[in-house]
Each structure stands twice: as C-alpha cells, then as structure tokens.
Image (tube, rainbow, N blue to C red):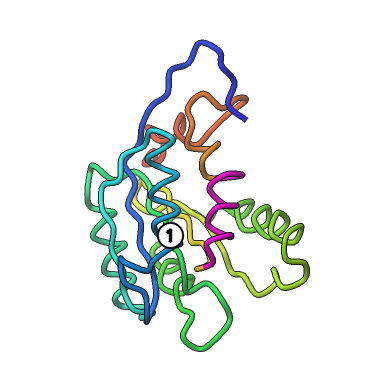
Amino acid sequence: MPDSGQRKFIPVGIAVLTVSDTRTEQDDKSGQTLITRLQNDGHVLRDRKIVIDDIDRIRAVVSGWCADRDIQVIITTGGTGVTGRDSTPEAVSALLDKKIEGFGEIFRMLSYEQIGASTIQSRAMAGVINGRYIFCLPGSTNACSTAWDKLIGPQLDYRTRPCNLVELMPRLLEK
C-alpha cells in the first residue's frame, strides 16, 4: 500500500489492449475499467486498441507499443484462458526479456478468494519487454479490477514502499 512519506507520485504512460473476437469500444467493460482506474490514479493513457484473439495481431500491437518511448506499461485483457482461441500468453511470451513469475501466482491467489478453483483456468502473466512492463489479464471485468487494485496499481505507484516497479524502470535495459 502506498505510504504518504516524502516521495511524489510519478505518472507513467500506459497502453491498454483488449483481446476479443466480439468486443468494441462501446461494450469493452474490462478495457474501460482499466482505463478509468489508471487515469483516476494519475497515470496517462497513451493508447487503446482492440484486436481479435490472433497471435500475430496481438504480437504486432505489443511490439509497436514497445518501440514507443511514451509507453512504459502495457496491459492486455482477454485471451488468457485455456480454449483454442485464447492466445495472449503465447503471443506475449515470445517477446519477453524477463517473466515476472510472482504476478501470475499472486493474481491467482487473489482470484481464488473470489472465484475458487475456477482460477486455475487463468494464465494471467507479467513480464518485461524492451524496458516496458506488460501485464496480461483475463477478460473479466472483475479480474481486471482485482489485478489493478491489488497488484498493478500499487506497484505502479512510486510512493509504494518498500519497493515498486516504477523505481526500477530506469534499470530495465541494463546489461
């Protein structure tokens, strides 16, 4: 949880990708939930897209955003299940420089408290690509709320102690 000490909030540029064969901007509740939360917390929405659940299309959007200096964080929603059409983890995994193992583990723990054993169907994940953080969330609005409120939001708040992801951003490309 953020502490109200000496640190000042540092906004980061975030892009939101909804992976869905049926959603539009008008009915994309999960994407809108993430946008509302990130903006309410003081971050900047740099881009928003909706693509069908296709590895090449997902990878193309994520790769493009990873070349944009104004985007420090990418959040995807949708395509993390176990059906034949769910391909977000496969699309993103090939691009990762590092996987943040704890994100998926903690997300599923939090989700278990809400939906029980159904959480095993989630392949939520996070990592680092070309100096940017990426979080891949389920398409459920509740899952997006939980992920932002309990994990992503606090870790993207520079005031969070003892540590947070924002303070590590300048070092992500170190060799």
Camera-side residue of 50 and 90: 50
Q: Position of residue 124 (x, y in %)?
A: 57, 64
Q: Position of residue 153 (x, y in %)?
A: 51, 40
Please name the residue that numbered disc 1 is placed on: 96
Determine the image quadrant of residue 19. bottom left
166, above or below 94, in the image: above
158, above or below 95, in the image: above
Camera-side residue of 154 and 127: 154
Determine the image quadrant of residue 65. bottom left
> What residue is rendered at 46% in x and 33% in y?
168
Left or right side of 19 for 141: right
Q: Where does the N terminus fall, quadrant-wise?
A: top right
Identity, as a three-letter code, of the amino acid under mark 1: Leu
Q: Where does the C terminus fall, quadrant-wise?
A: top left
Q: How many numbered discs, if any? A: 1
Left or right side of 45 for 129: right
Determine the image quadrant of residue 162. top right
Q: Position of residue 97 (x, y in %)?
A: 43, 55
Number of other residues with Cα within 10 Å of mark 1, as a class: few under 14, some 14 to 19, many 20 or more: some
> What residue is rendered at 68% in x and 52% in y?
106
Residue that extends furthest to the bottom in the rendered view of this protein? 84
Q: Which residues are magenta?
A: 140-151
User: Which structural element holds mark 1?
Assistant: loop
Left or right side of 52 for 77: right
* Magenta segment main secondary structure: helix
Q: Position of residue 39 (x, y in %)?
A: 37, 40
> What residue is rendered at 74% in x and 61% in y?
112
Residue that extends furthest to the front in the rendered view of this protein? 26
> What residue is rendered at 40% in x and 72% in y?
91
Residue 90 magenta: no
